[in-house]
């Protein structure tokens, strides 16, 4: 099993910044892709950004130029730097990792609330 623990959410004013972190732990695992989804009030969960083990990134159009995803493979940690935050970025943010133990599966963090409000 692989556990993902998120941190860094909170309340921020429009135009502000937050940095989310998600650390993976477990026994004998390797991580392939990692990324972030979000789910706003009354909305479906959507992919925000993801990053491969080689560092290739992908972003949903609404966050391009404002959010940056990165990862530290030595720490099995993925980050999401969020700048120029907007009210519509308000959501619960979930990290995920595609990891291989005895099999390959997708693992999820518990979610962290990001609220953008004046």
Image (cartoon, rainbow, N blue to C red):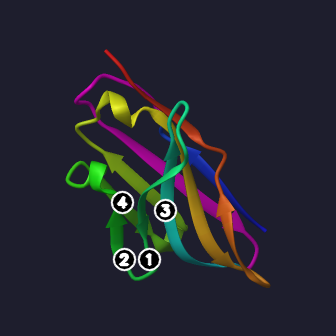
Circle 3/circle 2 CB separation < 8 Å: no
Check disc 1 and report its element: helix, strand or loop.
Answer: loop
Q: Is residue 18 magenta?
A: yes
Tell me if 30 is positioned left or right of 93 in this view.
Answer: right
- Residue 27 x, y percent position in the rendering: 76, 74
- Residue 70 x, y percent position in the rendering: 37, 63
The quarter of the image holding the C terminus is top left
Image point 43% across, 32% down: which residue? Answer: 90
Circle 3 Cα neighbour tier, 10 Å, few/some/many (<14 / 14–19 / ≥20): many
Circle 3/circle 4 CB separation < 8 Å: yes
Instruction: Give the mark, 3 or 4, whose residue is nearer the N terminus.
Output: 3
Q: Is residue 117 above or below residue 69?
A: above
Magenta highlight range: 10-28
Q: Which residue is mark 4?
A: 69
Distance between the alpha carbons at the discs numbered 3 and 1: 9 Å
- Numbered disc in front, either 3 or 2: 3
Which of the 4 quarters of the picture holds residue 26? Answer: bottom right
Mark drawn on residue 21: none
Circle 4/circle 2 CB separation < 8 Å: no
Q: Which residue is mark 3?
A: 35
Circle 4 Cα neighbour tier, 10 Å, few/some/many (<14 / 14–19 / ≥20): many
Instruction: Give the mark, 3 or 1, whose residue is nearer the N terminus.
Output: 3
Q: Is residue 99 above or below residue 92?
A: below
The quarter of the image holding the N terminus is bottom right
Check disc 2 and report its element: helix, strand or loop.
Answer: loop
Instruction: Give the mark, 4 or 1, whose residue is nearer the N terminus.
Output: 1
User: 72 and 48: which one is in front?
Assistant: 48
Circle 2/circle 1 CB separation < 8 Å: yes
Distance between the alpha carbons at the discs numbered 3 and 4: 8 Å
Q: Which residue is mark 2?
A: 55
Q: Is residue 24 magenta?
A: yes
Distance between the alpha carbons at the discs numbered 2 and 1: 5 Å
């Amino acid at each position: 099993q692989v556990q993902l623990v998120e941190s860094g959410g909170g309340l921020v004013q429009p135009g502000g910044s937050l940095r989310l972190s998600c650390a993976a732990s477990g026994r004998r695992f390797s991580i392939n892709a990692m990324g972030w989804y979000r789910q706003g009030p009354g909305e479906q969960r959507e992919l925000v950004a993801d990053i491969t083990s080689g560092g290739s990134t992908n972003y949903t159009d609404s966050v391009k130029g404002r959010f940056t995803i990165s990862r530290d493979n030595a720490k099995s940690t993925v980050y999401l730097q969020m700048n120029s935050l907007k009210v519509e970025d308000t959501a619960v943010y979930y990290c995920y990792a595609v990891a291989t133990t005895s099999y390959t599966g997708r693992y999820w963090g518990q979610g962290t609330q990001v609220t953008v409000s004046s």
